[in-house]
Image: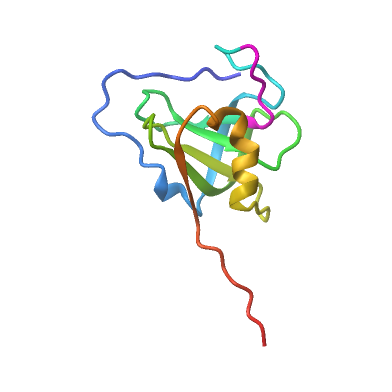
Amino acid sequence: MSRRRTCSSVSAYTNARPFLGQTVTVTIDRPLGSAHPRHSDIYYPVNYGFVPGTISPDGAELDVSLLGVFTPVETFTGLCIGVIHRTNNDDDKLIVVPDGKTYSRSQIRALTEFQERFFTSTLITLPRTRKRTT
């Protein structure tokens, strides 16, 4: 498993919002079913990792929750459908899914609640396209 890098002096952080709607390759360092490295009573119900080569305000790579993949994986390439922007922690999280998979805002919130319940955040998603009726 890859280890996260940290950097204490960075001149520019990676903005999470431009990842929306983009294909992203993720390194998973906390696979589905693994325990949190600092809180052994918290288990990851999703694959959780980071985007290599990015830096977030916490000094580590930009975090990612991978939804819709129900087995532990080491890497994954998928579509970024959302950004969880923490307003009391300054640490954004990408939401990545397999191509063609969709989740509602409430589903995203439910699937990330195991960790996000400790923070205040907003969920940024792409505008939903409406089906035309004739």
35 or 14: which is nearer to us? 35
- Judge whether 39 appears above or below 70 on screen: above
Q: Residue at x 68, y 53 (%)?
A: 101
- Judged from this view, the residue extending furthest toward the left is 11
Outermost residue toward the right in this view: 71
In which quadrant of the rendered view does residue 26 lie?
top right
Q: Is residue 97 visible?
A: no
Q: Residue reaching furthest bottom?
A: 134
Q: Residue at x 58, y 35 (%)?
A: 65
Location of the N terminus (image quadrant): top right
Look at the image and give the residue range highlighted in magenta. 40-47
Q: How many callouts does the rendering have?
A: 0
Spot occupied by residue 24 in the image (x, y as percentages of width and height) = 53, 43
Majority secondary structure in the magenta region: loop
Is 31 situated left or right of 13 in this image? right
Q: Is residue 22 above or below residue 65?
A: below
Instruction: State yes or no: residue 129 in magenta.
Output: no
In front here: 78 or 125?
125
The image shows residue 31, relative to residue 13, as above or below, that is above
x, y (%) of residue 125?
A: 50, 53
Q: Where is residue 28 in the image (x, y as percent from the top left)?
A: 60, 28
Is 84 left, or right, of 87 in this rendering? right
Q: Is residue 46 magenta?
A: yes
Q: Residue at x 35, y 37 (%)?
A: 14
For residue 59, side relative to residue 19 (left or right): left
- Counting from the top left corner in percent of width and height, residue 29 is at 59, 23
Visible in this render: residue 76?
yes
Q: Which quarter shows the C terminus?
A: bottom right
